Amino acid sequence: MPTRTARTAWTGTLEQGSGQVELTSSKLATYDVSFPKRAAEDAGGTTSPEELIAAAHSACYAMQLSALIAQAGGTPQALDVQADVSLGPDPAGGFRLTGITITVRGEVDGLDAAGFEQVAQEAKAGCPVSKALTGVEITLAAALET
């Protein structure tokens, strides 16, 4: 399996500095980052480690869920997955990820609501990004749409 790479170039202090995150493997984009905007409600055109983790988690979860739906005898027509990653103070000092919420809505042929909920929970546990983030509480809200 391949290794994927991203890099960040940072200048300045935490409070006044800024950086750029480059998606090196894919060469798709470079994104601005800064701590003040990371800690603000309005990201102001910059990304953050939490947003990048949310992107990785939602994509990984969608792939895992589509595989498990097929294994359970269903056919995924559409999956809408959102991951919300929260940053907050760490009682030990500094900051930490305080929680992740995955919300998934699925249009699936061949599974009922209970079957969809079961594979949705299995995908939460089996997604490689979920496994990497075991130190963070991950909650799931799954609903099958008709």
Image: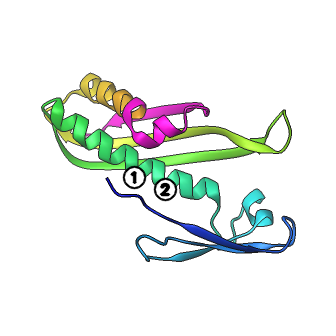
Front position in the image: 125 or 112: 125
Q: Residue at x 44, y 77 (%)?
A: 27
The answer to whether 1 is drawn above or below residue 4 in the figure is above
Q: Quadrant of the C terminus?
A: top left
Q: Secondary structure at mark 1?
A: helix
| Residue to which mark 2 is pinned | 55
Q: Residues within 10 Å of mark 2 (few under 14, many from 20)?
A: some
Residue 9 to residue 117: above or below? below
Q: Check disc 1 and give the amino acid type.
A: Ala
Q: Amino acid at mark 2?
A: Ala
Task: Determine if the magenta segment contains residue 128.
Answer: yes
Q: Position of residue 33 (x, y in %)?
A: 68, 69
Q: Position of residue 11 (x, y in %)?
A: 78, 76
Q: Name the spot of residue 135 as percent of width and height, x first.
A: 61, 32
Q: Quadrant of residue 21?
A: bottom right
Q: Seen in the image, is 44 located left or right of residue 124?
A: right
Q: Is residue 15 above or below residue 74?
A: below
Residue under numbered circle 1:
59
Q: Looking at this view, is 115 or 57 the one in front?
A: 57
In the image: residue 136, left or right of residue 60 = right
Q: Which residues are magenta?
A: 125-146
